[in-house]
Image (spheres, helix red, strand yellow):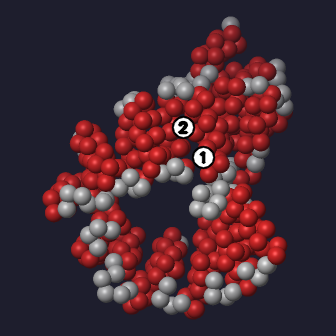
Amino acid sequence: MALARRNGKEAVQAFRTVLHDQPELATVQYLLGQAYQLIGETNLAKESFERAVALYPDQVDAKRSLAVLESRRGHYQQARARLDDLLKQRPDDMAALDMLMTLDLMTKNWPGAEQTFMRLRHHASAGNYVALVAEGRFYEAQRRVADAARAYERATALAPNEPEPLSFLVKLEVAQGQTLRAKARLESALVSRPDHPFAHGLLGEVLSLMGEHEGAVLRFREATRLNPKWMTPWLNWATLSISQKKADEAVQILEDGLKANPDSEELYMLLASAYSQQRQVDPAMAAYETVLRLNPRNLLAANNLAVFLIEHKGDPSSLQKAFGLSRDFEKEAPHPLFIDTLGWVRFKMGQHEEAIRLMKHAVAKSPEMSVLNYHLGIAFLQSGKRAEARTYLSRALKSADQFEGRREAEQLLAQLRG
C-alpha cells in the first residue's frame, strides 16, 4: 500500500479516487489526512481529519491526529479541547491521556498534569508501566528527581524489556551526573539478559559520554545486530564516527542502517552530513533530495540542499531550484541562516537590492555569525558600496571561524584597505 511505503502523493491520489465515488467513508478520509501529512499539506490533512470525525464521531484516530496537529502548531488550548472531547468518549484511552499529560508538562500546567497522571494510573491495567512512566515524567519536569527515579525504577521492574522505562531512568541518572550508576545498571541488565533489545544501545550512549569510544562502538554494533529497526544506535554510532573524523566509516554504518530502515529521514540527514565531511557533493545532495521526498517539510534539508546548489552548482537551473526550496524561508523559517540562504540565492540571481534587504535582516538577528557578515559584505561590494563592504567583511573575519569563502573575504578586504 502506498501509505505504508510512505509514498504520500500516490496515496493521496488513491484515496481521493475512492472518496470521489464514496465520500462518506470516514476511515478513507482519515487515511487521506495521513497521506496529506506525509507530503506536508497540514491544512488539507486537518480538513480530512475533521471530515472523518464529522462523518463518524467515533473515529478516534482522526481525533488524536487533530490534537497532534494543533499541538505542533503551538495551539495548545485547541489541542487540549480535542483531547478532552476524545476522553469524554473514551476515558480510558491511554494514548490520549499520555498526549494530554505531555501538553500539560509543555505548558507547565502542574495541577492538570497531576490530575492526568492520576487518571492514567486509575485506568492502567495491572502490570501496565505507562502510568508509572507518566508519573516519572511529571516529577522530572518539576525537578523532583528522587520521586522521578522511583517511578522509573518501578516501571522498569514491571516492563524490563520495554525501551521507555529503562531509557528514562538511565537518562535521568546521566543528567544528574550519575554516569557510573547508569553504566552499572545497564551492565547488570545485560548479565541477566545478554540479548536485551535496548540495553546495549543505551550502554553505548553512556560509554560514548564517558569517552570510552571503543566500548561504545562494540555496544552499538551489538544493538544494531539484535534490534536493527531501532534507529537510535545507528544514529549514535554514525555520529561518534563523524565526531572522530571517520566519515567513510559513518557512511558505511548509515548505509547498513538504511537497509533495515529505508524510510528514515534521520539516517538520510546524517548520511548527507557524512558525505559533506568527505566533500562528496553529489551524494550529499542526493541524500537531501531523498529526505525531501520522505518529508517535503524538512526545512533543514531544503536549506542545506539550496546551499549546495548555490555554492557547488551555480548554473541558472540550479539557482532556480535553490530559490524554489528557499522562497518561503522568510515567512516559514525565520532563522538567520535560512534567511541568509534566500538572500544569497537572490544575490546570485542578480537581485541585489532584495538580497541586501534579506541579508541585513539575517545579520541583525545574529550579528556575530561570520558567514552572514561575509555574504552581506560581498553583496555590498558588488553593489559598489565599498565602505559597507569593508565593515561587514571585517566583521566576518573577526573570529577564527572557518567558513566557505573565508580566503576570498581576506583577499577582498586587503584590496579594500589597500
Q: Which of 186 and 287 is in front in this view?
A: 287
Q: Residue 291 has which mark?
A: 1
Residue at image point 72% right, 57% down: 9
Q: Is residue 252 left or right of residue 351?
A: left
- Tell me: 351 left or right of 86: right
Q: In which quarter of the image is residue 133?
A: bottom left
Asked if marks 2 and 1 touch (Cβ < 8 Å), the reply is yes
**Residue occupying image coordinates x 31% and y 87%:** 126
Q: Between residue 358 and residue 295, name the one nearer to us.
A: 295
Viewer can see residue 177: no
Mark 2 and mark 1: Cα distance apart in space:
9 Å
If the image is split into quadrants, where does the C terminus sit? top right
In the orientation shown, which residue stands out farthest toward the top? Answer: 418
- Amino acid bearing label 1: Val
Answer with the quarter of the image where residue 148 lies. Answer: bottom left
369, above or below 173, in the image: above
Residue 255: x, y in percent?
A: 46, 40
Secondary structure of the residue carrying numbered label 2? helix
Density class for disc 1 (Cα within 10 Å; few <14, some 14-19, many ≥20) is many
Mark 2, residues whose alpha carbon is within 10 Å: few (<14), some, or many (≥20)? many
Q: Indicate the position of residue 3 as horizontal and vertical percent values.
A: 63, 62
**Of the residues shown, which amino acid type is indicated by label 2?**
Ala
Asked if residue 60 is positioned above or below residue 179 in the image, the reply reads below
Q: Where is residue 333 in the image (x, y as percent from the top left)?
A: 68, 50
- Element type at mark 1: helix
Rendered location of residue 311, percent (x, y):
67, 26
| Residue 1 visible to the viewer | yes
- The disc, 2 or 1, on the residue closer to the chain's N-terminal end is 2
Instruction: Write the residue at 61% across / 73% down.
Output: 65
Return the residue at label 2: 272
In this rendering, would 283 be left or right of 417? left
